[in-house]
Amino acid sequence: MSVAVSKLPPFPMPMLLHQLRTLSSSSSSRCFSSSLSMRRSTSSSPSLSCFPRSFTTTVKNDGGHENDLHIEEIFAKKRSLRTQIRKQLKNMSPDQRTEEDNTIQHAVLEAHWFQSANGLCAYVNCDALREVDTSKFLSKILCNEAKGMEVLNAFSSEDKCSKNRKKLFLPRIEDRNSNMKMLRVSSYDDLIPNSMNILEPTLQDHDGNEREDLMQASEPVDLFILPGLAFDKSGRRLGRSGGYYDVYLKKYFEIAEKRKWKPPLIVALSYSMQIVEDGSIGVTSDDIPVDALVCPAGVIYTNEVERIDNFGLISLGINVLTCRNVYILAEYSGIWGISL
């Protein structure tokens, strides 16, 4: 196979994104997608605004009846899928779960977006909810052993720990109205079980000082790592009906926009049986899509062109378009056409 690479003249990014969408939706071209991460050019680049971070639900508005009916159909679809996935997770063998946990966490640790993140939000998995394990990469950030938990300590010295320390924020549920906080922690000792026996940060540290709240932080985080109940490859995420992450992310995006911060990469962790066919998950405008899905098969990027992300990478679900045997690679300063 011969590969010829040629750099074409600079191409406006908005026009590029329009062309990519046109190619990906064309019924006449036989295209398939693959993951690709490209380093951003160091040269000056035109700005690219973010796409809306929610799904658009189009319904009729004749007196509101059709709206209500449509929304109820979506909620019924969600309830049915939740029941189905919960049964499958309950029947998942301990060996399969352990194997998939290890594979997923290894993929996270090896991902460029994890290694490059200076600050991130994640979650402490709950065994009762059968969430994907996060203990290994949390331990790598926190660099200590958890009391009463079987956690891998990724470092053997404080020197190694200090060189790799990231700012970590973990969720604390505030009420039953979908309100939660993301508070900074530095040790597993900062966590206590809540009424559902889920570990979450204390409001104050050991010195009695209020913990840093992400909503009042002076710097943005680069990454959110989320749990969930079901996902599809287009970025749709089905939670457990609480709405906590959707509500929180919307508030954070508003703050980030006001402060002119780059939006974080939204990544979800999923067992293989939690991935469903596209269209199986009903969504409303309140549902926030994810940018990437980490599963035992690897990292799956969503099928929508999302944005230029924080780490100098361009992440496209249709990142590599193999239409008519031509890979189209996009960069701020131009396009490379690679003919196979």
Image (tube, rainbow, N blue to C red):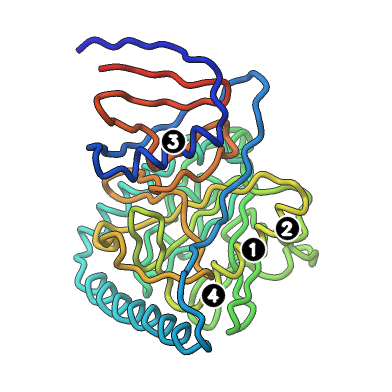
Marks 3 and 4, the one that precedes in the sequence: 3
**Marks 2 and 1: in contact by CB < 8 Å?**
no
Is 284 in front, or is 210? 284
Marks 1 and 4, the one that precedes in the sequence: 1
Q: Which numbered mark, 1 or 4, is in the foreground of this view?
A: 1
Characterize the local packing of mark 3: few (<14), some (14-19) or many (20 or more) Cα atoms within 10 angstroms. Answer: few
**Marks 2 and 4: in contact by CB < 8 Å?**
no
Distance, label 1 to label 2, CA atoms, is: 14 Å
Query: Which quarter of the picture shows residue 204?
Result: bottom right
Q: Which numbered mark, 4 or 2, is in the foreground of this view?
A: 2
Mark 1 sits on what residue? 182
Q: Secondary structure at mark 2?
A: helix
Task: Say which mark, if any, is on residue 193.
Answer: 4
- What's the residue at 39%, 58% (across, down)? 133
Query: Which quarter of the picture shows residue 183?
Result: bottom right
Mark 3 sits on what residue? 19
